[in-house]
Image: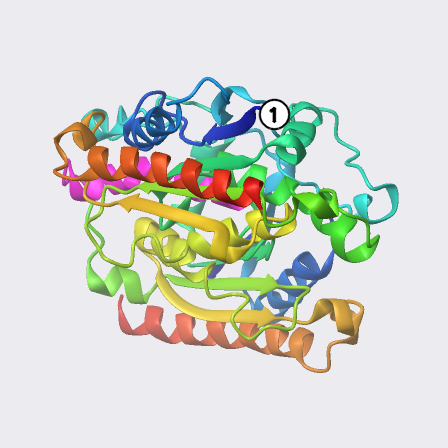
């Protein structure tokens, strides 16, 4: 069985540092035999969560747009790589907008109790966060992690790894970073290997 | 000179918990005739996300034409800027994050172009207030929202020490905050305290 990998690029900037890092990861998964798809949030049409809580009653989002189709795609993937640059110490508004729209899955899990991800499902679904930041601060990614954790929890994926690179302003771009692109490529290869093993074990 | 108060209500849900909290603070502030309050609901404000194009580093303005054209000047003019947000998925609502990210134009002005955001004589005479509500009861539910909020205030020349916070957890359904034991009292008191502090600063 082919491992399905979905890359989600949350940067408004096409082919910038973050998307390049994502591409390197995806290329790694591809060379390891995965089927790969990349979605660029900028090209999708979806609105932010309205906070209407209608999904708490029905388990469905009342806003029918590209976000729902993307969540369907996410739920069918074996690994997802979610990528966002750090803007103002957090993920981009585009990615936060998508994450917030996952509220209907939260409602299914915790209010309606119609959705449950057993542990053996979660370990076979790997989530990877990919990010770059201009600043050199060690803590520049810290405030992004909780939203990513919430996202992976919501869609039943294990928060497997981070591929993050700070200090882009000094390096003048990801291509000059000594290790990041190679690390991303290798982590892409590795995660497919790990998933292949897990799938052989669980028929 | 009137005191200008600019309040951004960040929730997509109108008159929900975080906006009610904001209204209470504004109620505490609107005690005198010289206080001019403007409240903006971000869900209607037409502020798009930042495109990350970095053009503001050269142009000293944003290339996007939207609601921010209008609020940019108001942000510069205000003496007190309030921002309220519900916590969604451990962070501010994406509408609020869009506003924060669009403050990039101020960051470019300040750090790249080395131009003033407010005239030097107004530095230290601007105050910020961040208000939030969260459905979860966790103590750490607001932690990841704060760094972005600090960025916003920092680039518009409101110092870390000049930001006040009131964050109420464990309120989820619309109206839940009405039943909170201390939120209303604390909010009204905060409004009064911030006005008193600003008057002190302006008198200096």
Q: Is A159 above or below relative to B87?
A: below
Q: Quadrant of residue B171?
A: top left
User: Residue tagged by mark 1?
Assistant: B1
- Identify which residue is drawn at 24% across, 31% down: A59
Magenta region, mostly helix, strand or loop?
A: helix
Q: Is B117 above or below relative to B39?
A: below
- The percent coordinates of residue B86 (x first, y second) are 35, 38
- Front-lying residue, B31 or B203: B203
Q: Is residue B8 visible?
A: yes
- The percent coordinates of residue A185 (x first, y second) are 62, 73
The reply, left or right, for residue B78 in relation to residue B164 is: right
- Front-lying residue, B29 or B134: B29
Q: Is residue A105 magenta?
A: yes
Which residue is farthest right? B58
Q: Helix, strand, or loop for circle 1?
A: loop
- Front-lying residue, B174 or A83: B174
- Identify which residue is drawn at 27% across, 27% down: A53
The reply, left or right, for residue A58 in relation to residue A141 is: left
Q: Is residue A46 magenta?
A: no
User: Total marks drawn?
Assistant: 1
- Mark 1 closeness class: few <14, some 14–19, many ≥20 residues within 10 Å: few
- Identify which residue is drawn at 63% across, 71% down: A166
Q: Is B173 above or below relative to B60?
A: above
- Front-lying residue, B125 or A129: B125
The reply, left or right, for residue B194 in relation to residue A24 is: left
- The percent coordinates of residue B45 (x first, y second) are 56, 22
In magenta, the rendered stretch is A93-114
The reply, left or right, for residue B193 in relation to residue B202 is: left
């Amino acid at each position: 069985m082919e491992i399905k990998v979905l890359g989600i690029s949350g940067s408004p900037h096409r082919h910038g540092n973050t998307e390049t890092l994502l591409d390197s990861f995806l290329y790694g998964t591809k060379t390891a035999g995965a089927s790969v798809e990349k979605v660029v949030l900028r090209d999708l049409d979806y609105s932010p969560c309205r906070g209407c809580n209608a999904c708490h009653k029905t388990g469905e989002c009342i806003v029918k747009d590209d976000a729902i189709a993307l969540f369907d795609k996410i739920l069918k993937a074996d690994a997802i790589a979610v990528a966002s640059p750090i803007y103002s110490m957090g993920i981009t508004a585009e990615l936060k907008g998508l994450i917030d729209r996952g509220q209907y899955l939260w409602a299914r899990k915790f209010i309606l109790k119609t959705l449950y991800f057993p542990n053996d499902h979660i370990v076979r679904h790997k989530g990877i966060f990919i990010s770059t930041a201009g600043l050199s601060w060690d803590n520049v990614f810290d405030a992004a992690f909780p939203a990513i954790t919430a996202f992976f929890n919501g869609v039943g994926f294990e928060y497997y790894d981070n591929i993050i690179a700070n200090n882009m302003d000094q390096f003048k771009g990801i291509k000059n970073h000594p290790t990041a692109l190679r690390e991303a490529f290798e982590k892409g290869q590795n995660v497919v290997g790990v998933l292949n093993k897990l799938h052989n074990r669980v028929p | 000179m009137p005191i200008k108060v600019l309040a951004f209500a960040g929730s997509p849900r109108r008159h929900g918990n975080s906006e009610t909290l904001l209204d209470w603070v504004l109620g505490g502030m609107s005690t005198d005739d010289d206080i001019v309050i403007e409240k903006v609901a971000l869900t209607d404000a037409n502020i798009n996300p930042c495109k990350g194009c970095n053009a503001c580093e050269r142009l000293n303005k944003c290339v996007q034409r939207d609601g921010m054209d209008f609020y940019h000047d108001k942000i510069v003019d205000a003496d007190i800027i309030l921002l309220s947000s519900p916590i969604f998925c451990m962070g501010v609502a994406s509408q609020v994050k869009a506003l924060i990210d669009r403050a990039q134009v101020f960051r470019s002005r300040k750090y790249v172009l080395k131009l003033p955001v407010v005239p030097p004589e107004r530095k230290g005479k601007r105050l910020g207030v961040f208000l939030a509500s969260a459905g979860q009861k966790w103590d750490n539910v607001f932690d990841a929202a704060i760094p972005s909020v600090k960025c916003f205030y920092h680039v518009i020349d409101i110092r870390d020490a000049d930001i006040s916070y009131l964050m109420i957890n464990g309120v989820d359904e619309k109206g839940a905050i009405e039943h909170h034991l201390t939120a209303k009292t604390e909010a009204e008191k905060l409004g009064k305290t911030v006005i008193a502090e600003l008057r002190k600063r302006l008198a200096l």
